[in-house]
Image (tube, rainbow, N blue to C red):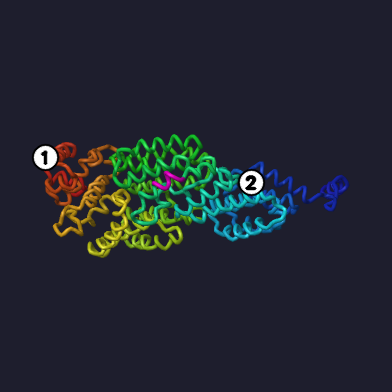
């Protein structure tokens, strides 16, 4: 009875449903959700509002905080809502519509936007209601968006940047410095190096032409030039100038808040620490980034940091420190980024390597080339071959493993790439020929490349976590002592070690003597056993 009386009272006081402006109500509810950053609810109410201005408001959601997650988690619903906008309406807001397509490709990695971009380019070009200066700008913006489709072909990207720079008079209205230019990959060169023997040319192209992209985007990827050079030197085992280049990269990146560049510089610095006997420092530096990345709340930045931590943890042998999703292969939609899925897969494979699951390791390694597709790159192929070689060596013996490693060396040698192989440390050393002789030399001369690789690989010994944290055992050795002991562990005499490292036999003798003291060893055999972890 009380409910009936109250219902009658409300019916008299409130207007009927026919008198309520449903569109206005939906719009107000949508704005309320936008204010609370509940964007999927806002999108749904804007669709229900149904007016032209409400449909156009949809396009503005993707520039708001959290807008990237709409396409990650509700891709089909978002695409359906946007495609329901009539073309005459899209032509009223052409820049906003192109910005949506740019976001689809650059942030959400949704390749369905390619068809929409082609259609937009054609319609905007012949639309009578768009003035000529705006058509010129739209042509430049479309060209810049196509940069996403030319991805990892740096020479094609260079041409696009130059042409777009001319059409847009040096500044895009769509692309900006908030873009995650590395697609969440912590290793910049991984993205763009495609063929053996082109690394040096790639560095020259980046240093000579990337400024066009910086200007177009108000600083996106600023700091990349010294970063790419630092990565190149690091891969070649030339460490002297790396720290200075990374410092220069960080200064530039901070000036435009380029967190992506800063994360990649931190990863490169961590790899330098690993190669120079500062493993725990490498991990600590990366962990220091977690609060800043979490505060930004961007899934790609979180993925980038996880990949960096997973990679470095694997090099240290700390399987438990690899993020769980990488260990278990639980990638999910937000981490299945086609441009870097090879990097994700071989970092996942490193966890299988540490677990001693050789069959699974072989399976993952063989599948990596299949995931590359149009985003084929050299580092992924090298890593896949090394991982497959290690698995084959354990499963089928040294002959099979040696053949596969030879294929990896053929890919890496033309550019002098060492570190990406050497970081496998004790897993790699049993596969290398001993002594490191040139496969093409009839006189069986020492192979400088293989000797350098063996020396670097020896810097990643099988130290336990306790040994590493206490700073004892092999982790206390200098880089040169590790180089010498690594070659000594492979049976090389002092004279052969001297030739491989380009020093005198007397210098080798002195280095060994100092290494004995650090290891608490009384002779060569005992020092080698302690260094390699053999008992």
Q: Residue furthest right?
A: 12
Q: Look at mark 2 in the image and give the residue it sits on.
A: 38
Decide whether residue 180 is among the magenta residues: no
Residue 85 seen in render: no
Distance, label 2 to label 1, CA atoms, is 71 Å
The image shows residue 151 at horizontal and vertical percentages of: 48, 54
Residue at 15% across, 57% down: 444
* Dominant secondary structure (helix, strand or loop) of the stretch shown in magenta: helix
In this view, the residue in front, 337 or 35, is 337
In this view, the residue in front, 47 or 135, is 135
Badge 1: residue crowd in 10 Å (few <14, some 14–19, many ≥20): few
Q: Which mark is residue 506?
A: 1
Residue 207 seen in render: yes
Dot 2 or dot 1: first in sequence order is: 2
The image shows residue 207 at horizontal and vertical percentages of: 42, 44
Residue at 32% across, 38% down: 241
Name the mark nearer the viewer: 2 or 1: 1
Question: Mark 1: which secondary structure?
Answer: helix
In this view, the residue in front, 171 or 369, is 171
């Amino acid at each position: 009875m009380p409910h009936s009386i109250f219902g009658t009272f409300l019916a008299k006081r409130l207007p009927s449903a026919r008198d309520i402006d449903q569109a206005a109500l939906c719009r107000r509810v949508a704005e309320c959700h936008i204010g609370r950053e509940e964007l999927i609810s806002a999108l749904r109410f804007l669709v229900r509002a149904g007016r032209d201005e409400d449909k156009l408001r949809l396009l503005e959601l993707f520039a708001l905080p959290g807008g990237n997650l709409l396409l990650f988690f509700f891709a089909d619903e978002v695409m359906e809502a946007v495609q329901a906008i009539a073309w005459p309406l899209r032509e009223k807001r052409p820049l906003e519509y192109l910005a949506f397509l740019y976001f689809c490709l650059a942030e959400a990695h949704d390749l369905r936007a390619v068809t929409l971009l082609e259609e937009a380019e054609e319609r905007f070009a012949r639309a009578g209601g768009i003035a000529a200066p705006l058509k010129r700008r739209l042509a430049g913006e479309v060209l810049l968006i196509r940069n996403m489709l030319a991805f990892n072909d740096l020479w094609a990207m260079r041409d696009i940047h130059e042409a777009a720079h001319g059409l847009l008079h040096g500044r895009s209205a769509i692309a900006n410095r908030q873009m995650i230019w590395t697609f969440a990959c912590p290793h910049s060169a991984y993205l763009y190096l495609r063929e053996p023997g082109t690394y040096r040319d790639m560095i020259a192209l980046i240093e000579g032409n990337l400024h066009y992209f910086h200007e177009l985007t108000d600083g996106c990827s600023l700091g990349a030039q010294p970063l790419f050079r630092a990565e190149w030197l690091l891969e070649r085992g030339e460490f002297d100038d790396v720290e200075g280049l990374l410092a220069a990269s960080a200064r530039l990146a901070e000036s435009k808040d380029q967190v992506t560049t800063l994360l990649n510089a931190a990863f490169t610095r961590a790899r330098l620490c690993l190669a120079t006997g500062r493993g725990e420092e490498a991990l600590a530096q990366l962990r220091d980034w977690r609060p800043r990345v979490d505060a930004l709340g961007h899934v790609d930045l979180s993925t980038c940091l996880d990949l960096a931590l997973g990679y470095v943890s694997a090099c240290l042998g700390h399987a438990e420190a690899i993020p769980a999703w990488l260990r278990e292969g639980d990638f999910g939609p937000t981490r299945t980024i086609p441009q870097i899925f090879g990097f994700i897969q071989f970092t996942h494979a490193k966890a299988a390597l540490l677990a001693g699951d050789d069959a699974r390791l072989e399976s993952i390694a063989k599948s990596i080339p299949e995931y590359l597709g149009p985003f084929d790159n050299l580092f992924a192929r090298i890593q896949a071959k090394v991982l497959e070689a290690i698995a084959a060596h354990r499963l089928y013996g040294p002959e099979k493993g040696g053949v596969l490693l030879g294929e990896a060396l053929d890919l890496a040698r033309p550019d002098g790439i060492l570190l990406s192989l050497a970081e496998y440390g004790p897993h790699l050393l049993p596969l290398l020929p001993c002594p490191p002789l040139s496969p093409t030399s009839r006189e069986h001369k020492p192979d400088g490349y293989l000797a350098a690789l063996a020396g670097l690989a020896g810097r990643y010994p099988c130290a336990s976590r306790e040994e590493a944290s206490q700073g004892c055992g092999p982790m206390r050795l200098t880089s040169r002592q590790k180089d010498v002991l690594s070659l000594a562990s492979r049976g090389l005499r002092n004279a052969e070690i001297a030739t491989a490292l380009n020093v005198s036999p007397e210098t080798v003798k002195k280095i060994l003597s100092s290494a004995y003291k650090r290891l608490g060893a009384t002779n060569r055999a005992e020092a080698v056993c302690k260094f390699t972890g053999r008992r």
